[in-house]
Amino acid sequence: MKPATAITEILLMLISAGHLLRLIFQIEISANGIPVPMWPSITGCVIPFVLTILL
């Protein structure tokens, strides 16, 4: 495995884990005072995980 591939897999797994933790612990995030809904974290968890598996 090339080093760039390994680094990409690690970063994608960290992104996926971060979104999963947000979903589990129900962490509220706001951007410029506007609350960000939870549903983007579902896609933010699934898509990077699938990409990691495909790599």
Image (cartoon, rainbow, N blue to C red):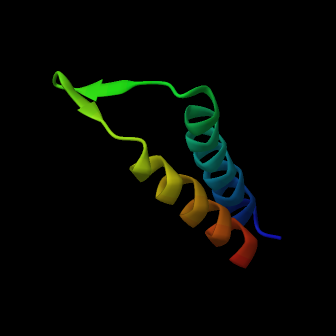
**Quarter of image, res 23:** top right
Task: Determine if residue 55 is in view.
Answer: no
Identify which residue, 19 or 54, lies in the foreground: 19
Residue 51 pos. (x, y %):
62, 70
Identify which residue, 36 or 7, lies in the foreground: 36
- In the rendered image, the quadrant that contains the N terminus is bottom right
* Residue at left offset 69%, top offset 66%: 52
- In the rendered image, the quadrant that contains the C terminus is bottom right
* Residue at left offset 59%, top offset 62%: 46
Residue 17 pos. (x, y %):
66, 43
What count of labels does the image hold? Answer: 0
Residue 24 pos. (x, y %):
64, 34
Residue 5 pos. (x, y %):
70, 66
Identify which residue, 25 or 8, lies in the foreground: 25
Residue 27, compared with residue 13, is above or below; it is: above
Residue 32, compared with residue 1, is above or below; it is: above
**Quarter of image, res 6:** bottom right
**Quarter of image, res 38:** top left
Residue 22, compared with residue 10, is above or below; it is: above
* Residue at left offset 51%, top offset 54%: 42
Q: Is residue 52 left or right of residue 36?
A: right
Task: Determine if residue 32 is in view.
Answer: yes
Q: Is residue 6 left or right of residue 31?
A: right
